Amino acid sequence: MHELLTTEEMAEADRRAVALGVPGLTLMENAGRAVADEAAKMVAPGARIAVLCGPGNNGGDGFVAARLLKERDYDVRVACLVPVAALKGDAAEMAGKWGGDVAEDPFDWDFPWHDAKLTIDALFGAGLSRPIDPDSYEAELIQRVNATDGERVLAVDVPSGLNGSTGLADGPCVWAERTVTFFRKKPGHVLMPGRLLCGELVVADIGIPDEVLSHPEFAVLHGGVRIVDGELCLDGRRITPSEVSTWQKKSLSDPDTCENTPRPYSWMGWYPWPRLDAHKYTRGHALVVSGPPFQTGAARLSARAALRIGAGLVTVAGSSPACAVNAAHLTAIMLTVCNNAKDLREILEDKRKNAVLIGPGAGVGDETRAIVEAALASGADVVLDADALTSFAEKPDATTERVSFGFTATSAKQEVTPGALFTAITARRSLLPLGRRSPEGGDEGAVRSQAGDSPLTPALSPRGEGASVVMTPHEGEFKRLFGDVAGSKLDRARHAAKLSGAIVVLKGPDTVIAAPDGFAAINANAPPALATAGSGDVLAGFITGLIAQGMPAFEAACAAVWIHGECANTFGPGLIAEDLPEVLPKVLAALQAQRPA
């Protein structure tokens, strides 16, 4: 499965497992065994291993790992942040089973840490509810872990100091080579910088049944209200149904966040593989708006990406001078003259052009804003990238030179606010659901929902309202459009999607795809090679091409982001943006082979 559970949800899963009859000691024993197994893979037999245990269950996992490694003849030394007598519950039980010496001060010379080949970080894990004080003893200890020369570090659950729900480290944090977590990943494992701090991530099965995610007796209600023994309870107090009349049940099997993967019951169930009776008109017509003559390359990258990923037809629209430049480069991709917003409105009267991309190389200014507004007023699905977003950022200067569609103009400042864009997006909700438009002119105007013909019932249902809008900002564009938004990258993407009414693809090594209803997916397969000019233009083209084929916009964005990363992984070193569409057939062939028979 691909659910990502917050630290609170994971604690709830543990509680449910115990309620279903799995002893807490069994879970801790299995967790410690998983840690010991990974430790044994990292160092040679008999090597010295230092185990640093904290005061909670994370420390208990460490004591189990220490005992099992000692039984395998490793030279194991254990230190604990608190006296063993102060430990409670399962952690105290496992500390008692260790049976060896426990140093109460890891800096004591009696604890021979200096020549250990591996340090196991079992200090805090995800149970830490506060940032570590930079001036504290714990911070000094973490600094010692990170400063080791040639010593390897294995973290239990999450590196100490990392917030497992946000991926943020607001204070000192262990930098691990490998992290062992249990049952499900957390958002902090895949969000930056958590993904980097965790190193290689191993998810271990410790005996928590999948049933804990959906068992009806353990339904959780918003606001901490739970069903316990058939009664509604809040903080241990029984309450009446009328007190929670406005609350909705929430099941862990319907998470708010998933990892973006091509598992069969995610976006794979909606992928628009061509049918035997398909032809170019049933596979959609994508329109890409070009920039001025010397900024046409970005639009061509997007257009080729849309065509490669399966759109039946792709047209690049631009000014007459831009069309002349594009004509020298394009073959299967068509051209049409579009000098202004009026021209675009007329072009989109052809209902077969069902998905339009604006932004790559478009230029920032009034003309681009007008083009965006014309597209949003149509029934086509719209993907907004780069300059299309920046054009709606508030401009502080009174007079701005604007370059767009091959013309340069200087004009007095107009009232420009992101709210104008968000209002235009919201107004689209009266349009046809999911942007699938009624054909005009018979079958040639139809776009079949090939994804809807899938025999699967995807876990992720379509999440668009009205004709879909997808925005694909990087961090700089996001800040220009949405300002300084507090919280993690996941929080910020969710806020932006809810505020704008669009699906937001907040790009980066940990791209977050967020829907207006709060659902989000986090991508984790993108390599550093994607940090190259034009890479984002190709991604926008992939999204547009999939939407043109009738794939629901949220799922199309998820698929495009994952495929984008996999293209870079497949190509390897030396990648430039032009390579991404060319390696796509190999990636799609591998993806198609994963389809259930």
Image (cartoon, rainbow, N blue to C red):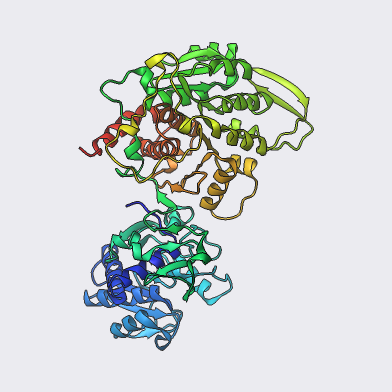
- Given the current orientation, which residue lies at the most extreme left position? 597
Q: Position of residue 206 (x, y in %)?
A: 28, 66
The quarter of the picture where the C terminus appears is top left
Classify residue 305 by image quadrant.
Answer: top left
Q: Position of residue 104 (x, y in %)?
A: 43, 84
Q: Position of residue 3 (x, y in %)?
A: 37, 53
Classify residue 175 by image quadrant.
Answer: bottom left
Instruction: Choose between 31 and 340: the one closer to the eye.
Output: 340
Residue depicted at x 39% and y 42%: 461
Q: Is residue 217 left or right of residue 394?
A: left
Q: Is residue 183 visible?
A: no
Instruction: Choose between 355 and 588: the one closer to the eye.
Output: 355
| Count of numbered badges drawn on the protein | 0
Q: Is residue 495 visible?
A: yes
Residue depicted at x 39% and y 80%: 79
Q: Is residue 109 left or right of residue 215?
A: right
On screen, residue 403 above or below 160: above
- Given the current orientation, which residue lies at the most extreme bottom position? 85
Instruction: Choose between 99 and 455: the one closer to the eye.
Output: 455
On screen, residue 550 above or below 503: above
Classify residue 418 by image quadrant.
Answer: top right
Q: Position of residue 267 (x, y in %)?
A: 36, 40
